[in-house]
Amino acid sequence: MNIGYKIDHRNLIVKLHGELDHHIAEDVREEIDIAIEQNSIKNVIFDFKDINFMDSSGVGVVIGRYRKVSKTGGKVVAINLNKHVKRIFDLSGMNKIIGVYNNYEEAKASL
């Protein structure tokens, strides 16, 4: 799993590559939380374009960041969901609290 970050104003764009599962979920959580705290991040945008697998631990990563930033009025959104990740969002009900958009421009406009 590779994680890339980009900061645009107070938005943290998290680009995930590979698998987001129980083997690496804790490391991903820690890295994102450090980036949020060190950069006064308000919103988190997860880019799932290059994710080929995600399990319930990945759901926990997303929901946990949602809880963290929503305490300060921020939002978490997701972009570029493939069929597998979209199914997990639908089955878990995450799509009811996490905005899902086709690309960064749409996501940024929603924030």
Image: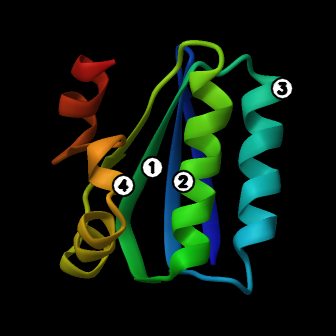
Which mark sits nearer the N-terminus, 4 or 1?
A: 1
Dot 4, crowdedness within 10 Å: few (<14), some or many (≥20)?
some
Which mark sits nearer the N-terminus, 4 or 3?
A: 3
User: Mark 2 near mark 1, Cβ–Cβ under 8 Å?
Assistant: yes
Looking at the image, residue 51 sits to the left or right of residue 100; the answer is right
Which mark sits nearer the N-terminus, 3 or 1?
A: 3
Dot 2, crowdedness within 10 Å: few (<14), some or many (≥20)?
many
Which residue position is annotated with label 1?
A: 46
- Structural distance between the alpha carbons of marks 2 and 4: 9 Å
Q: Which tag is nearer the camera, tag 2 or tag 3?
A: 2
Observer-nearest of 57 and 93: 93
Secondary structure beneath disc 2? Answer: helix
Which residue position is annotated with label 2?
A: 62
Secondary structure beneath disc 3? Answer: helix
Q: Residue at x 83, y 26 (%)?
A: 38
User: Mark 3 near mark 1, Cβ–Cβ under 8 Å?
Assistant: no
- Structural distance between the alpha carbons of marks 2 and 3: 19 Å
User: Mark 2 near mark 4, Cβ–Cβ under 8 Å?
Assistant: yes
Give the label on residue 94, or none: 4
Which residue position is annotated with label 3?
A: 38
| Image location of residue 32, percent across then percent down | 71, 47
**Which residue type carries mark 1?**
Phe
**Which residue type carries mark 2?**
Val
- Structural distance between the alpha carbons of marks 3 and 1: 18 Å
Q: Which tag is nearer the camera, tag 4 or tag 3?
A: 4
- Structural distance between the alpha carbons of marks 4 and 1: 13 Å
